[in-house]
Image: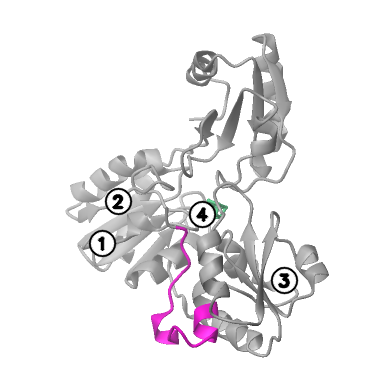
Amino acid sequence: MSLTLNSDLLEKIKESGAKTVALQFPEGLKRKAFLFSEQLKKEGYRVFISGNPCWGACDLDLEILGRADILVHFGHAPVGDFDRVIYEPYFQKIEIRTLEKVLPHLSSGNISIVTTVQHAPQTDEIIEFFRSKGYSCTTGKTSERTPYRGQVLGCTYSAAKNTGADEILYIGTGVFHAIGVKLATGIKVTAFDPVTGEIQVIDESKMLRIRFAKIEKARSAEKTAILVSTKSGQIREELAERLLSLSKKADIVYIKEITPDALLNLGYEAYVNTACPRLAYDDNVRFPAPLLSPEEYEILLGVREWEDYEIDEIVR
Ligand code: SF4
């Protein structure tokens, strides 16, 4: 399904009774804004575009929604339940026959599959493919943040867990989600990129070595900031309060965009990230001081053992 002002979307907008429509796009799709605006204006709507950075449906532009009747959020599936928001995810169809390439890389006949939202509408078709090849194949449960069957996010791995499978096939680009799946489940994970055709068995050891080094570096910090994002789907105030209660050397800092410059100006010697988990894991080299996950901070403070390391997930 391509990202267009299709009749379903137009019907949803009409049904909402809106006169003013706000549009929000992720970075890679922002250049489509003008196209959508033109079409909606022809239909008689007043249109506002959100120009703020957006990396997920966890980051709804509620300010622009305050100035409009509805917000159409493009590119992502819903993360939680918000009134007056229409979601228009971006789907990319994969050629099911390309999965043949994966078969020699699987070591068990009992597998489960996970994928990103782009390919999640094909989960049942993918499962059927592996079953037709003689595999036992399933996927885990959906969650409030991952409503599509088989879908995982960089902050939620519900679909990877408790399936009874011996190994997991991740279908999607990049390896971040696949490493998260490996850390969330502890079983073999093979990643298949349906765009490049690349296949790799996930090895999380390099990431764990980096994370261990970050924890050790943060040990000498005299002052630590526990970061709480004000983004709609990233606020974890209870977690931040619990972490604050563990140490007298920490402050809670509210911040919307966690950027290297923002942290440089704050000047703390270490940070704990309760916002999007990817910031600590994926973007760690960009930050001027160690940015730990909540679980890593617990290890630093001695309330969790390194052996009990867990990937950070936002559970709602
Ligand atoms: Fe994606 Fe991060 Fe938002 Fe989760 S919190 S939906 S991983 S941007």
User: Which amino acid, by three-letter code, is at mark 2?
Assistant: Lys
Whether 189 is drawn above or below 59: the answer is below
Q: Do the residues labelled 1 and 2 touch (CB within 8 Å)?
A: yes
State how far apart marks 1 and 3 are (Cα). 35 Å
- The x, y position of residue 42, in whole percent, is 68, 10
Q: Does the residue labelled 1 lie within 8 Å of ligand 1?
A: no
Q: Name the residue under label 2.
A: 141
Whether 308 is drawn above or below 52: the answer is below
Position of 91 with respect to 283 (left or right) is left
State how far apart marks 4 and 1 are (Cα). 24 Å
Camera-side mark, 4 or 3: 3
State how far apart marks 2 and 3 are (Cα). 34 Å
Disc nearer the start of the sequence (4/1):
1
Write down the region rendered in magenta.
Answer: 297-314
| Residue 172 among those drawn in magenta | no
**Within-10-Å neighbours for mark 4: few <14, some 14–19, many 20+:** some
State how far apart marks 2 and 4 are (Cα). 22 Å
Q: Mark 4 points at which residue?
A: 173
Q: Name the residue under label 1.
A: 162
